[in-house]
Image (tube, rainbow, N blue to C red):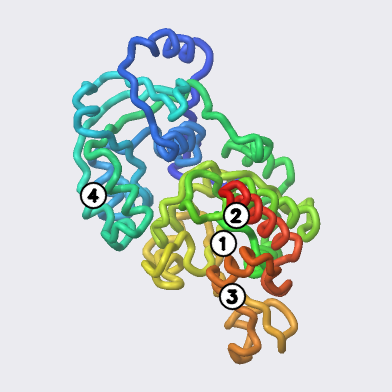
Amino acid sequence: MPIAPHGGILVNRLVVGEEKRRLEHKFGSMEPLHLTHREVSDLEMIAVGAFSPLEGFLCRKDYDSVVEHNRFPHGLPWSIPVTLGVPKKEAERHRLGDNIALYGEDGDALGVLHLEEKWIPDKQREAQAVFLTQDLAHPGVQYLMNMGEVCLGGKISLINRPKTENTYVKYKLDPAETRVLIKEKGWERVVAFQTRNPVHRAHEYIQKCALEMVDGLLLHPLVGATKKDDIPADVRMECYKVLMEQYYPKDRIVMSVFPAAMRYAGPREAIFHALVRKNYGCTHFIVGRDHAGVGNYYGTYDAQLIFHNFDPEEIEITPMFFEHSFYCRRCDGMASNKTCPHSAEDKIILSGTAVRKMLREGIVPPKEFTRPEIAEILINSIRKMEIGMGL
């Protein structure tokens, strides 16, 4: 039996047929609202069911419960508040019960917000609860504090899908589509891997360890908004394709992009990422070290420990916990502290800062850390970026 979506029903807020024509006819007479890039991705993720059971942007009661308790008021786990914030003057233009025309940053007509409630969030409380800090240097806190001071809550209807980058358009599968694909492949146990970075040898190692225990792997890279210094999505996609073509069993792996934005919420986002992959039809979810982390705001394995706060039957998707992995010269292979007894001198462990420095200088990191083909892609991308900047 396939795993049920979170909440039992896969939400579908994509309007078609007569309903679409009706909303399009009235669209020009609605008050407009222009969304940010992240809000556009949230809109689409709600509409296609990736954020099931959400049918729209949160109202106050749901928001308070999610922030305080990691749950909706009726008890269903949910860890990230998905809200739509606007400036006070913008909020004053909209009345409860209105249909608001939603536009992308490029002016494309996307959908409708059926306004149920206007309310003011407690941003300091949300920042501390969700990100465990109020530090403006944290990208998630920074986004939150820059968001409009009034939230608009209500269900949404998506009339037109946002434009998809050509780089990954053929890899963009909605939850309903990945579920069909999983069924066609006959997979009963499917593990998902979330990433916003190129896959290096440690990632590859834990993915293949997971593959020993399940039928298939959904490589599900996030391609929505990320930090400015994160590797661009198109570059990451090239890295993933090389790995899939040369180092993975083609009949046991599927890649599909996840067009959501990063929150950098560490433990809370690990729960969120797991629940979302459940909607895509996955039964298992890989949680490594510092999942969805940034800086030093979270403990190394806090993203694993948070799962102990939930009953496995209410989460349903099974987390697969992995420790930090590395290449050990004496073991002559990939390992972790669970399996390797040797000293630090025997282990090839490089910091992200050290790797970025090597790549900028055109130095290929050790093959025990990253595949040479991947390093070449990253070095070339850095060179192109520097040429574009006139460096």
Would you name the residue on which mark 3 appears? Answer: 350
Residue, far front: 390
Label 1 vs label 3: CA separation? 22 Å
Q: Earlier in the sequence, mark 1 or mark 4?
A: 4
Q: Position of residue 246 (x, y in %)?
A: 80, 57
Label 2 vs label 1: CA separation? 6 Å
User: Which amino acid, by three-letter code, is at mark 4?
Assistant: Lys
Q: Nearer the viewer, residue 271 or 188?
A: 271
Q: Is residue 189 visible?
A: no
User: Which image quadrant for residue 257?
Assistant: top right
- Label 1 vs label 4, nearer the camera: 4
Q: Position of residue 50 (x, y in %)?
A: 50, 40
Q: Position of residue 355 (x, y in %)?
A: 60, 69
Q: Earlier in the sequence, mark 2 or mark 1?
A: 2
Would you name the residue on which mark 2 appears? Answer: 192
Q: Is residue 119 visible?
A: yes
- In the image, taking residue 351 as reference, residue 142 lies left or right, namely left
Q: Earlier in the sequence, mark 1 or mark 3?
A: 1
Q: Earlier in the sequence, mark 3 or mark 4?
A: 4
Estimate how packed mark 2 is, as few (under 14), some (14 to 19) or many (20 or more) residues with alpha carbons within 10 Å: many
Q: Which mark is residue 151?
A: none
Label 3 vs label 2: CA separation? 25 Å
Q: At 61% from the left edge and 63% from the top edge, which residue is drawn?
A: 360
Would you name the residue on which mark 1 appears? Answer: 286
- Label 3 vs label 2, nearer the camera: 3
Label 3 vs label 4: CA separation? 36 Å
Q: Which mark is residue 123?
A: 4
- Element assignment for label 1: strand
